[in-house]
Image: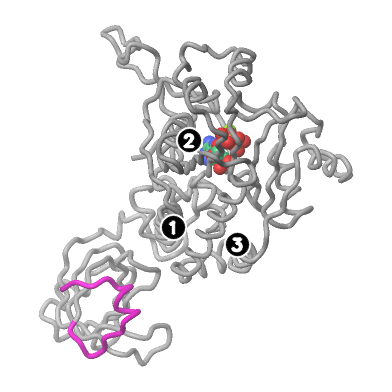
């Protein structure tokens, strides 16, 4: 039976017949045999294969193997006398499954730049770095589900096609069917778009089921060509009834710590690669975060800190304007030197559904900022008071009729409730140290680019 290399390295069942399947990374010939390095994607490590010249297809096939060819190997797992690996396979059989013409195969043994690899989104997961990112991403996703499921949250699948644009969190992509003249038509009888957030629908379920979360794709048609923005990204959005801003902050902090600890415990080999080649000190950063309480400041205090900093920012700091990424990073990297929760933003720069504070100027919002990235979480306590919500909607010139269902949640059995959105790719960036968000999603969609 075929085994994954990851299992063989872990269990080391030596002197047993084993079988693996994967892709050749390198081939090196000596006088009487060849060393094949095979990777099957299950882990960073390759399996070293010793293919002796006695093998029936040695000169005809094995000696033709090049980077990228696919093979199935059957042989004896042995302790390896050489440095660099603990076990190796002495092949009894090497089946060549698919060739990869070395004249055209774009992945060479040398390191390629991430920019170069972006044009190869169909092959780049075969490289060490992108393979490691993919495994870490998968584990983080598992960790998120595990965290919520263990706490008794229910997952809700909120719609991808939506008719409510959630505050205008970002520009919406329109969903239409072209008519014969190529003009857009309202398939749904009204204008519809790709969701920018599942929050409003998550609120519906939170006010029926209790604690819920969504974990799905969201879309923003913004023309932001930054290293932290995608047009399609995944978001985790818990929504908790009978929960205020404090409780919300606590869940967000617990979630981040939980998934970081889980990924360090389960992906250490991949994380070591990032620590070595992508962000020096990454692992001690991650450990430090798990062990320490997050910082906390209000928006008003944060503005004071920035004004006193005596640092020249590109964008001026002024009470009432949103914090720019340079301000966020200064606060978390230089001032607090740890993840930082900023609360109570001016109402005017936040959406209508955030709960108005008693000062009448700020809302019960919270963002979590992390070093190297800036905002990773955005959340709030929601306005549960019918009259306040309605007047906020009118002020924001929102069509009340369209959101009557949302107001119903306050008409019938309203409760204080809170939630937040954690950008999944920003989390993967934070954990891997990858500078550009395009490297942490399999098929990035950005303005002007949507490969595969
Ligand atoms: P930013 O100010 O960075 O554009 P935002 O305030 O628009 O973020 P929210 O609408 O609060 O973000 O979304 C919640 C979370 O989703 C953010 O904290 C971030 O982690 C993530 N996020 C938002 N926009 C994007 C994007 N275009 N690409 C990737 N992740 C995003
Ligand atoms: Mg945005």
Check the image and report above or below for 432 versus 5: above
For marks 3 and 1, the one nearer the N-term is 1
Question: Any magenta on residue 24?
Answer: no
Residue 143: mark: 1
Which image quarter: residue 185? top left
- Residue of label 2: 446
Query: Where's residue 382, x and y in %?
Result: 58, 32
Q: Dividing the image into four equal quarters, which quarter contains ligand 1? A: top right
User: Could you give the CA–CA distance between mark 3 and mark 1, rounded to whole angstroms?
Assistant: 22 Å
Quadrant (top left/top right/bottom left/bottom right) for the N terminus: bottom left
User: Could you give the CA–CA distance between mark 1 and mark 2, rounded to whole angstroms?
Assistant: 27 Å
Which image quarter: residue 98? bottom left
For marks 1 and 2, the one nearer the N-term is 1
Q: Are marks 3 and 2 in contact (CB under 8 Å)?
A: no
Between 380 and 122, the residue placed more toward the observer is 380
Q: Is residue 442 left or right of residue 393?
A: left
Residue drawn at (26%, 86%) of the image: 13
Check the image and report above or below for 402 versus 27: above
Label 3: which secondary element: loop
User: Could you give the CA–CA distance between mark 3 and mark 2, rounded to whole angstroms?
Assistant: 24 Å
Question: Any magenta on residue 7?
Answer: yes
Residue drawn at (14%, 82%) of the image: 55
Between 435 and 372, the residue placed more toward the observer is 372
- Residue of label 3: 279
């Amino acid at each position: 039976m075929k085994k994954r290399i990851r299992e063989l390295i872990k269990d080391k069942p030596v002197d047993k017949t084993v079988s693996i399947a994967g892709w050749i990374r390198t081939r090196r010939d000596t006088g009487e045999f060849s060393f094949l390095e095979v990777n099957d994607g299950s882990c960073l490590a390759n399996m070293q294969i010793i293919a002796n010249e006695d093998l029936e297809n040695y000169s005809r096939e094995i000696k033709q193997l090049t980077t990228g060819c696919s093979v199935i190997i059957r042989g004896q797992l042995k302790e390896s006398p050489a440095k660099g690996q603990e076990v190796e396979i002495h092949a009894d059989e090497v089946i060549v499954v698919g060739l990869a013409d070395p004249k055209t195969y774009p992945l060479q043994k040398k390191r390629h730049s991430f920019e170069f690899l972006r044009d190869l989104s169909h092959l780049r997961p075969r490289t060490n770095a992108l393979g490691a990112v993919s495994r870490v991403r998968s584990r983080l996703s598992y960790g998120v589900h595990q965290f919520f499921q263990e706490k008794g949250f229910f997952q809700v699948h909120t719609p991808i096609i939506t008719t409510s644009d959630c505050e205008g969190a970002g520009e919406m992509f329109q969903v239409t069917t072209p008519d014969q003249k190529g003009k857009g038509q309202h398939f749904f009888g009204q204008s519809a778009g790709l969701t920018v957030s599942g929050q409003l629908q998550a609120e519906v379920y939170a006010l029926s089921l209790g604690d819920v979360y969504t974990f799905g794709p969201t879309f923003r048609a913004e023309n932001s060509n930054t290293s932290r923005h995608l047009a399609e990204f995944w978001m985790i959005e818990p929504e908790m009834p009978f929960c205020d801003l404090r409780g919300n902050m606590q869940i967000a902090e617990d979630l981040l710590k939980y998934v970081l600890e889980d990924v360090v415990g389960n992906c250490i080999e991949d994380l070591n690669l990032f620590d070595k080649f992508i962000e020096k000190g990454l692992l001690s950063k991650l450990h430090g975060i798990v062990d320490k309480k997050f910082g906390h400041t209000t928006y008003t205090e944060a503005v004071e800190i920035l004004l006193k900093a005596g640092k020249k920012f590109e964008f001026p700091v002024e009470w009432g304007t949103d914090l720019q990424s340079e301000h966020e990073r200064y606060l978390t990297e230089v001032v607090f030197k740890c993840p930082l929760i900023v609360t109570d933003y001016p109402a005017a720069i936040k959406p209508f559904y955030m709960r108005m504070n008693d000062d009448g100027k700020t809302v019960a919002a919270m963002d979590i900022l992390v070093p190297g990235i800036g905002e990773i979480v955005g959340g709030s306590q929601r306005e549960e008071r019918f009259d306040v919500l309605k007047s906020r909607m009118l002020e924001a010139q929102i069509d009340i009729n369209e959101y009557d269902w949302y107001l119903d949640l306050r008409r019938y059995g309203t409760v204080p409730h809170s939630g937040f959105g954690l950008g999944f790719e920003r989390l993967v960036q934070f954990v891997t140290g990858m500078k550009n968000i395009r490297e942490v999603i399999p098929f990035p969609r950005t303005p002007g680019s949507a490969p595969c």
